[in-house]
Image (cartoon, rainbow, N blue to C red):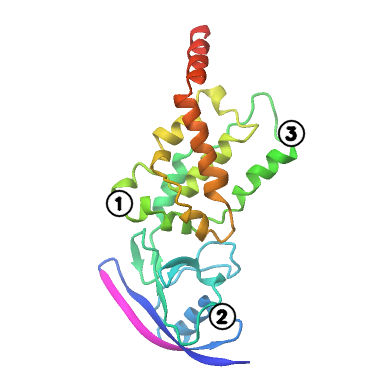
């Protein structure tokens, strides 16, 4: 087994402030950054705070920024860095720091609660739902999300503009709206809920300018921008500005 010493800079601090601290740590073949963090805890900084759980890229807990890029600590192999490269680990920049590498991501859970859930069709019992395979496949991509919130962290609408957070759900939850809006069994409109309108008016879809930064950092390779956000934008624009759709809605309301 090959072993070498690597130079790390790790952010230490809390909500009152902090700074980067330098460490030299032994690295073994095949290790990931989370292994190094654990070795730091075991040998040099036992009070280093880091959030993790599965170490298999499926729980989304160990989100952080490595050399300025949002990544999962457990899925970032040390082999992607040169041996003489300094590896800098910092907490997610878009969210308040609790301590060291642990951030307060409760913003995301608050946004999740704002998204109306799936509305089952009237008269259908669980087990009676039927969908075409192509419709299943379309929404299944979005269900791969592990809620690591890397897309939320890298989205500059959230990251660089604190004032936008009240009005903008972020890519993870706009993707959820898109998934429900394209679901063939979702009966939201029958209850008066227009997901396209709420995406625009209540969840800030218009703030997204499709830079695809969310797609670039997704560890599940979900094509958030191309397959969720852009189609949702197109449907929202059609609903709001297409004159034929507008006329159809007017006629429908009059008949009602």
| Residue at the image point whose x is 48% and y is 54% from the top | 214
Q: Position of residue 51 (x, y in %)?
A: 46, 68
The CA span between labels 1 and 3 is 43 Å
Q: Earlier in the sequence, mark 1 or mark 3?
A: 3
Q: Nearer the viewer, mark 1 or mark 3?
A: 1
The CA span between labels 2 and 3 is 46 Å
| Residue at the image point whose x is 50% and y is 23% from the top | 192
Label 1 neighbour load within 10 Å: few <14, some 14-19, many 20+:
few
Q: Quadrant of residue 28?
A: bottom right
Residue 79 shows which numbered tag? 2
Element on which disc 1 rests: helix
Residue 162 shows which numbered tag? 1
Q: Nearer the viewer, residue 251 or 130?
A: 251
Element on which disc 3 rests: loop
Label 2 neighbour load within 10 Å: few <14, some 14-19, many 20+:
some
248 part of magenta stretch:
no
Q: Position of residue 212 (x, y in %)?
A: 48, 52
Residue 130 shows which numbered tag? 3
Residue 103 shows which numbered tag? none
Q: Quadrant of the N terminus?
A: bottom right
Q: Is residue 116 visible?
A: no
Q: Position of residue 137 (x, y in %)?
A: 69, 44
The CA span between labels 1 and 2 is 35 Å
């Amino acid at each position: 087994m090959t072993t070498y010493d690597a130079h790390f800079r790790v952010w230490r601090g809390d909500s009152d402030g902090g700074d980067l601290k330098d460490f030299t740590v032994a690295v073994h073949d095949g290790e990931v950054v989370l292994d190094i963090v654990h070795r730091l805890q075991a040998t040099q900084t036992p009070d280093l705070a880091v959030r993790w759980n599965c170490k298999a890229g499926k729980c989304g807990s160990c989100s952080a920024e490595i050399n300025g890029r949002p990544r999962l600590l457990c899925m970032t192999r040390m082999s992607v860095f040169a041996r003489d490269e300094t590896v800098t680990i910092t907490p997610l920049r878009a969210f308040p720091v609790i301590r060291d590498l642990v951030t307060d991501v409760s913003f995301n859970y608050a946004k999740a609660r704002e998204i109306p859930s799936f509305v089952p069709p009237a008269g259908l019992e669980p087990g009676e739902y039927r969908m075409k395979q192509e419709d299943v496949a379309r929404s299944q991509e979005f269900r791969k999300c592990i809620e690591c919130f890397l897309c939320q962290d890298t989205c500059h609408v959230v990251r660089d503009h604190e004032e936008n957070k009240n009005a903008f759900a972020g890519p993870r939850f706009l993707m959820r709206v898109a998934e429900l809006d394209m679901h063939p069994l979702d009966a939201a409109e029958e209850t008066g809920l227009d997901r396209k309108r709420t995406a625009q008016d209540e969840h800030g879809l218009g703030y997204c300018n499709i830079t695809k930064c969310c797609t670039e950092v997704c560890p599940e390779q979900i094509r958030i921008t191309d397959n969720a956000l852009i189609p949702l934008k197109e449907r929202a624009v059609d609903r709001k500005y297409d004159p034929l759709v507008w006329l159809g809605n007017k006629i429908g309301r009059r008949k009602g």
